Image: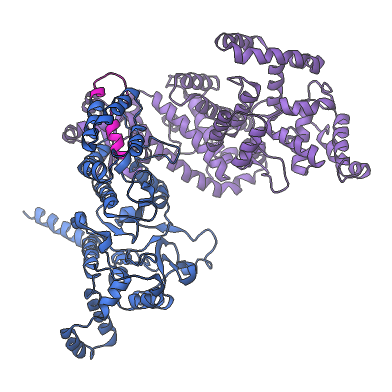
Amino acid sequence: MPTSDYDPACLPDLLPLYYRRLFPFSQYYRWLSYGGVSKNYFQNREFSFTLKDDIYVRYQSFTTQNELEKEMQKMVPYKVDIGAVYSHRPSQHNVVKSGTFQALEKELVFDIDMTDYDDVRRCCSAADICSKCWTLMIIAIRILDRALREDFGFHHLLWVYSGRRGVHCWVCDDAARKLSVAARSAVAEYLSLVKGGEETLRKVVLSDPIHPFINHSLSVVERYFQQYAIVEQDILGSKESVDKVLALLLTTHIKKDLTIYYQDEKNPMKRWDRLCALVEHKKSSIKKGGQYFDKEIMLQYCYPRLDVNVSKGVNHLLKSPFSVHPKTGRISVPIDLKELNTFDPFEVPTISLICEELERPTADEAEEDDVKDKENEQEAGERRRIRDYKRTSLAKYVKVFDRFLEAMARSWKGEMLKKSGELETSFSVFLTFMSFTYT
Amino acid sequence: RQFYQRARRRKKLIGNFQNDLYDQCLQFYGQPPLENISLTEFETFAVERLKLLKTVENVGVSCGKSSEQYTKKLDAEISSLNFPHRGGISEYEKRRKDHISHFILRLAYCQTEDLRRWFIQQEMDLFRYRFNCLHSKHKTDFLHKNNLKYETVSAEEKKNLKDKLIASSYGLSGTKVEEHDVYKVPFQDALDLVRTRKVYLLAGNAYIPHHEIVTIVLNDFRTRLSKALAMTARSLPAVQSDERLQPLLSHLSHAYVGQDYSIQKNIGKISLEQIDALSGKSFPLCMRHLHKALRENHHLRHGGRMQYGLFLKGIGLTLEQALQFWRSEFVKGKVDADKFDKAYAYSVRHMFGKEGKRTDYTPYSCMKVILSNPPSQGDYHGCPFRHSDPELLKQKLQNYKVSPSGINQILELVKGMHYQLACQKYFELTHNVEDAGFSLNHPNQYFTESQKLLNGGRDIKKEVDMSQRSQENPASVTHPSQANSKQAHEEMGDLDSFFQDE
């Protein structure tokens, strides 16, 4: 198993190595500069670092990629968070006239945390996850990715594994970065179906008409529900969990019927079928409500739970991709949605693993080194670094990031052309006009 | 700036232009008025619009904005205050008033975040109501006239999306989709519908059926008004330098448009011994709170002395009684009689000063208590529903034996920033009635209404209501009032005559 034992005590030794030779700074800088379409976009971005001994520093900002690298290598942050792009350089926020220092733009972000599902997962709780409950993340990603693309028209989404118990989504479209607080909150509310805290038993309530978004989400949930909930989570196995499910049914006669039926029928799949059949049967009766109990149960057990507060704030700080998770040692890596079904959070490389992989020499590389070292130091340094992560398990995740950047870069080109290329367009219009005139 | 010039006697009415401007019942208030008006008209228009907005607020919370009651009550108020109503023919004067009064209130309500928020909320509710009253054709006319170019969806696209549209929007049928326009706007312009998932979204666009277009228009309205208020705030200093306008404007933003209790009725009908009991039964929470603090600490700071002292004057205490009241309490504390006479007696006498109608010396209205002079550490004045931490408020209400469900209702209203309605609810709960029967605006009004209720002394109209209610709810309503009225009668003596003036 390519994890290599991770010990948090080793972080002080591993992190310097990570930031010197593995962190993909050039791609990172390319991302946050967004093609240079907006001036000072990178320079006005806030970063926050959590240093050794839990010292937390905010309002870090950098003018160049080089400065970013040097500072991170010097400060060796245990955690890196990304904040908003401000009106001025965050590092100078104290000097700016009070009231004028403002957060202007930031990616639209979502944070799905497994602990928010503790009331509906039986395999783990709190910070633990396993392959069984990981399915919840797959469901969440599929539902949200579709909605953000098809309903909201966003194109550039970066999904990242948080390193322990959840996933983050960074929506990087220009329109997304410019959204107001009210708009972010509206998007998050639109995407929320599971409502209520400890005191609420029935957290999903559906009524006619069922919005197309809910239907789309249901079809994703239905694909996974039987295997995930009935088989793996065994929600209709023990009396305790059966009671929890039945508590969501308001109609007493269905509950009664099922309680009796379950006394004899122990097969969970058959139990679920019976429940669905009864609800279906009830549908035909005239009374309002209750015709969607089975769907509500599926959603309550599987539908993504997001923290609206994370998405709402323009100045909210979120863990950076490629940051290290201090407790697990895992790197926050981008997730390739094409390979989502085979993504295994336990296969995600830890910092100890990749540092160890770094040290393993290979024959041909030793020769190359001799030749290329004669070149200019900076270039060689870059190339060495490019080669460095490529030697490790981190490589494939940086590739995912590269592909994401490629797609965005095409849109930046469009933007730049728009800004500087007005001449081009008007010239071509002129030509067309001329050709019409002289025909 | 343009309409600061209004108050200067310069240009004459621009006849035709004005006729065009007022050819529609409803407007976006994009252009400020350009004419001259007298100061009297200035004040009257403003006060009447304020009354209207306050009604909009009260009725909105107590009725539910789409209920029949809401429509009836608002219709009545709009008519009685002479504002434009459902597009009658000869509405020119009313529309002019609508236009001008809106802009005057902008001046008064642009200054603080609280005021702006309140003003925008009520103007939006009023706008929504009036827009919804328009005929479909007039709605479309309005959109066109105001250059609201919302893109309409092609017939073909409508056909393709028909089922999805019906499933996303409430009250939308297949025929409606075919016959009426469906608009396509970027989702950022339809946040209220997106937030509640009441609209179909595709590729970043929200598909709005015709009957929902008001939400989009409202969004637009709010954005424009918000920007306008910010700009108004910036040019306010210039306006405020006009001494004719300044007092009017500051009066408006603290405005209270009812009885001001400055002229004392029934002076001397209350004895000092009754005040403790009265504070529990008939004082609004703010005054009950102040009284308790005074009794416990034998002292109140200036803000508290003013708020409570003027209230006591309003309920009928004489100057001699007031002096005796304050002195006896302060002397129990750190102040000796001499010091009281030197330092505090003066201000008590001032409160009773006979300098005529001066705003400072009239008992504070709820608006004034809520909006000005927030309490700090060591203060007990202000409005508990506005200024107390909800946890502390909850505890206090529990101590005063308010039911848990009642407390929840109150806290909900507080959360929605409806402080006077929360106090009204407190009235209803402590007096054990379903409906206070009045719209609370003033602490002294609370006291008067409470006494009325406890005393069983009611005028004819309210008696009818009472008997209707007693038919529905015999136990809860008539019983306590009957029991109380006997007791109250004994205690209050000839306080009965207090209420005959109604």
* Residue B249 in sight in this render: no
Q: Is residue B361 visible?
A: yes
- In the image, taking residue B450 as reference, residue A302 lies left or right, namely left
Residue sitting at x 67%, y 29%: B442
Residue A354, placed above or below residue A416: below
Which residue, as the protein is rendered here, is positioned at the far front?
A264
Q: Nearer the viewer, residue B446 or B131?
A: B446
Q: Is residue B502 above or below residue A364?
A: above
Residue found at the far right of this picture:
B338
Q: Quick check: is A292 in the magenta stretch?
A: yes
Nearest the eye: B427 or A229 = A229
Placement of the N terminus of chain A among the 4 image quadrants: bottom left
Picture coordinates of residue B446, whole percent (x, y): 68, 26
**Which of the two residues, B15 or B303, is positioned nearer the viewer here?**
B303
Q: Which residues are magenta?
A: A281-299
Q: Give the quarter of the image for residue A6.
A: bottom left
Residue A423 belongs to the span the image colors magenta: no
Frontmost residue, B65 versus A379: A379
Identify the colour of chain B in the image. purple
Q: Residue furthest left?
A: A439
Chain A, hue in figure: blue
Kindly indicate the quadrant of the structure image that contains residue B405.
Answer: top right
> In the rendered picture of this protein, how many numbered marks are placed on residues?
0
Colour mode of the rendering? by chain
Q: Is residue A215 left or right of residue A240?
A: left
- Residue A290 vs A128, above or below: the answer is above
Measured as percent of width and height from the top left, residue A27 is found at 27, 69
Q: Position of residue B247 (x, y in %)?
A: 67, 39
